Image (cartoon, grey):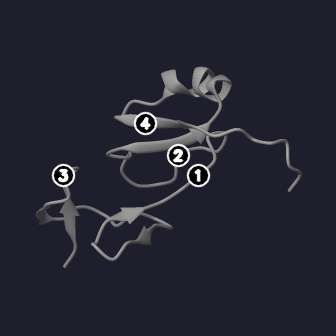
Amino acid sequence: MEFSISRAGRRRGPVSGPPLVRALRLPDGCRVRGRGLRRPLPRGPVPDFGLYLGTSRLRRRHDGELDWPRTWIDWPDFLLSP
């Protein structure tokens, strides 16, 4: 049985609904998944919380599209090629 975790780190109740698609399960039971902001939202529920890495330009471009609580960390691209 899976449990949801509150933002304070306390276990809430059993998770209801479908599991997150392509998510990583952390040792405490939380599930996280990542995606590039240019990609569409994956199937499943919208995030309870978002942690985003990027520049202020990226934040200005995408912040209005996000309907859930979030935090941005200033993370320069360094213009590295893939």
Q: Amino acid at mark 4?
A: Thr
Q: Disc 4 or 1, which lies upstream in sequence?
A: 1
Q: Are marks 4 and 1 in contact (CB under 8 Å)?
A: no
Q: Position of residue 79 (x, y in %)?
A: 85, 42
Q: Residue at x 51, y 67 (%)?
A: 22
Distance in Å between CA atoms under marks 2 and 1: 8 Å
Q: Position of residue 36 (x, y in %)?
A: 63, 47
Residue 9 position (above or below residue 28): above
Distance in Å between CA atoms under marks 4 and 2: 18 Å
Res 16 visible: no
The image's mark for residue 35 is: 1
Pointer 4 residue: 71
What is the secondary structure assignment of the residue under circle 2?
loop
Pointer 2 residue: 41
Distance in Å between CA atoms under marks 3 and 1: 24 Å
Q: Disc 3 or 2, which lies upstream in sequence?
A: 3
Q: Are marks 2 and 1 in contact (CB under 8 Å)?
A: yes
Q: Residue at x 51, y 25 (%)?
A: 63
Q: Quadrant of residue 74?
A: top right
Q: Nearer the viewer, mark 3 or mark 1?
A: 3
Q: Nearer the viewer, mark 3 or mark 2?
A: 3
Res 79 visible: yes
Assign the N terminus to one quadrant of the image: bottom left
Assign the C terminus to one quadrant of the image: bottom right
